[in-house]
């Protein structure tokens, strides 16, 4: 819990409340007494928030990141402040949950990679062949996406089955459609509002490239009679790349 007992912290919160009231464009400025009531309300009900988080809540509400109507139709008062801070808390919780899930997934992948690396090379080749057969089958039958890091694409490229020059109008149109769906999802959950335009542009370019490759893989595998035979004919070098 943040320490709001000292006068310096309280005065800093007074400044934030004053700035926030101005930023939302209330018709009349709050009096000193009204500002202190707001400060007391925040400390009493949101004492676990840091000053930085309250400023974040203010900025996110002003930039339409929070999924709530951020307009202040009356006085800048506790009811409005509670609405914004609650929306911020919900957004913070969902964001942290996603980050924790990603960290957990990354740790799991790292542990699995370390276990795999400890195996003899021949055993690792067999494990990877097995994974490739399973995932390629899913890509053919269920139209799932490539594995992390474009693994299937990189193996098929090393095998000479596919390459960037083979990307055609069909793959491009498919990628544009799928990327548009990703953008729509991002707009709905607010993801696009929390990243810069440069990062956003780079992200969507990467997504579009991935979908182009996925489309080529799907089409190639759709005419492969036996994926197991296809993978088993690949050399160990093709399967493992530069792994030793």
Image: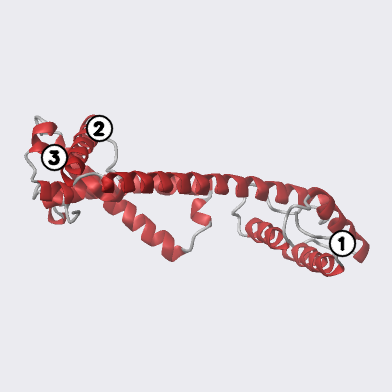
Looking at the figure, which quarter contains the C terminus? Answer: bottom left
Residue that appears at 19% across and 35% down: 133
Q: Is residue 216 left or right of residue 96?
A: left
Distance from label 2 to label 3 (Cα)? 13 Å
Label 2: which secondary element: helix
Label 3: which secondary element: helix
Label 1: which secondary element: helix
Residue 196 drawn above or below residue 190 = below
What residue did someone put label 3 on?
Answer: 220
Residue that appears at 75% across and 52% down: 48
Residue that appears at 45% across and 63% down: 197
Residue 77 in the image, given as x and y percentages of width and height: 83, 54
Q: Within 10 Å of the Cα at label 2, are there few (<14), some (14-19), or many (20+) other Cα atoms? A: some
The mark closer to the camera, 1 or 2, is 2
Q: Is residue 134 left or right of residue 183?
A: left
Residue 129 in the image, given as x and y percentages of width and height: 17, 39
What residue did someone put label 1 on?
Answer: 35
Q: Earlier in the sequence, mark 2 or mark 3?
A: 2
The mark closer to the camera, 2 or 3, is 2
What residue did someone put label 2 on?
Answer: 138
Residue 142 in the image, given as x and y percentages of width and height: 27, 30
**Picture quadrant of residue 216:** top left
Residue 167 drawn above or below residue 134 = below
Q: Earlier in the sequence, mark 1 or mark 2?
A: 1
């Amino acid at each position: 819990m943040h320490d709001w007992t000292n006068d310096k912290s309280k005065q800093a919160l007074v400044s934030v409340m004053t700035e926030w009231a101005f930023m939302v464009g209330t018709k009349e400025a709050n009096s000193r007494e009204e500002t202190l009531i707001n400060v007391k309300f925040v400390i009493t009900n949101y004492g676990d928030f840091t000053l930085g988080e309250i400023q974040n809540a203010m900025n996110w509400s002003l930039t339409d990141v929070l999924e709530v109507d951020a307009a202040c139709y009356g006085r800048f008062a506790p009811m409005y402040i509670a609405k914004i801070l609650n929306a911020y808390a919900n957004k913070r919780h969902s964001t942290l949950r996603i980050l924790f899930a990603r960290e957990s997934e990354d740790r799991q992948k790292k542990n699995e990679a370390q276990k795999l690396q400890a195996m003899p090379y021949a055993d690792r080749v067999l494990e990877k062949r097995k994974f490739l057969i399973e995932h390629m089958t899913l890509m053919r039958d269920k139209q799932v996406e490539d594995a992390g890091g474009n693994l299937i694409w990189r193996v098929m490229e090393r095998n000479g089955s596919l390459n960037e020059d083979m990307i055609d109008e069909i793959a491009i149109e498919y990628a544009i459609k799928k990327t548009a769906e990703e953008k729509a999802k991002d707009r709905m959950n607010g993801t696009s509002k929390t990243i810069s335009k440069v990062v956003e542009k780079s992200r969507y370019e990467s997504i579009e490239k991935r979908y182009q490759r996925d489309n080529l893989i799907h089409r190639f595998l759709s005419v492969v009679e036996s994926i197991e035979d296809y993978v088993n004919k690949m050399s160990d070098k093709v399967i493992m790349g530069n792994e030793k």
